[in-house]
Image (cartoon, helix red, strand yellow):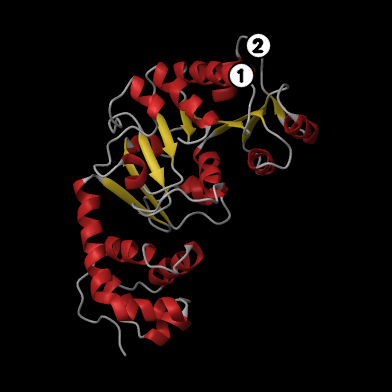
Amino acid sequence: MSGVRETHINLTQLILLLHNLPGVGEQTLTHILTHREANELAPKEILAYTPKQWQETLKVSAKTTQHFFQNQEALLKKSQEQERTRRLNDIHLFDIGSAAYPSYLEAYDSFPPPVVYARGNLSLLEPTVTKRFAILVSNNPTPAILQKLNEITEALCHAGGIVVTGHDRLPYKRAALAAQHVNRPILYVLDQGLRCALGKNFDKVLFAEASIQDDSFNTDVDVAVSHLPFDVPAMHNLQRRDRMVTSFANVLIALDVRPNGVMFSEAKRAFEQKRRLFVSTEGREGNRVLLDMGATALPTGSDWIQKVLG
């Protein structure tokens, strides 16, 4: 059995096909994209590989290989439909190794996502933007911590900072609402596909509280990014989302982290990478552990904003 030898397919369609193919995870997709680039293969040449080459060269499992070759016509048609959807809704796709792929994801993540989808204000993703910040707060924060989160976010946004946050944890929502309150851009990192989060027209607000100020997702101001295909629902493993939040940010503030939690791990990783990390002297035990490691305490003087944003 041979591959699809005469199919006209562009690179974006190939990536959409592979990323939506059951059984092709991030590691396999990264391997395929790296192999294609290293060997300067056209997308149609990948599809022309035999089942044996899919398994031995592309490292695709036997079950997934069989599924592709048995359903290739339907899968190709679906990828064409998704490419039309992508273009019609102004969704951008960045694949690892390409010039447009966010370089800081590769710099700060030992295994960055092979594909990133984005909709909205892409200027927020530019490497020249140096005032992106994220505030790390573990689950179940106190009302006092949430109030402090609001105050820090608003102050940094007023000074030109851009908050990097999610949309479905209370601390993430509060950071987004604080930025929205002062009419500043937001970089949302999602834990689900763009269509699942933004609705069929890719334009609904990301969570109910945000609708107080906006009646739709503001693509001129904000940007939403995801490492998942359009229609993938929320995933149970949220560490990828949180890793992307901290990788997109130039500055991290550990406001209230519990030891051994995900937020603590992300702050510790940033400290070990010698990134700009500030730790509140308040908060839970994880903050004390970070400070004992030598992390910089969050400034409290009148010039604290300048010291944080640089």
- Residue 120 in picture, x, y percent from top left: 31, 37
Q: Which residue is mark 2?
A: 301
- Residue 92 in picture, x, y percent from top left: 30, 48
Above or below — where is 74 with respect to 193? below
Q: Which residue is mark 1?
A: 143
Residue at 49% across / 40% down in the picture?
248
Which quarter shows the C terminus? top right
Which quarter shows the N terminus? bottom left
Badge 2 local density, few (<14 within 10 Å), some, or many (20+)?
few
Q: Earlier in the sequence, mark 1 or mark 2?
A: 1
Residues at circles 1 and 2 in contact by the CB criterion of under 8 Å: no
Find residue 266 and report its image quarter.
top right
217 left or right, relative to 166: left
| Depth check, front residue: 203 or 117 | 203
Above or below — where is 235 with respect to 214? below
Residue 305 appearing in the image: yes
Q: Residue furthest top?
A: 302
- Residue 128 in picture, x, y percent from top left: 42, 36
Amino acid under label 2? Gly
- Residue 215 in picture, x, y percent from top left: 28, 26
Q: Which mark is residue 16?
A: none
| Depth check, front residue: 112 or 97 | 112
Query: Tag 1, which secondary structure?
Result: helix
Q: CA distance from mark 1 to mark 2?
A: 23 Å
Q: Residue furthest bottom?
A: 1
Residue at 54% across / 47% down in the picture?
238
Amino acid under label 1? Pro
| Depth check, front residue: 283 or 168 | 168
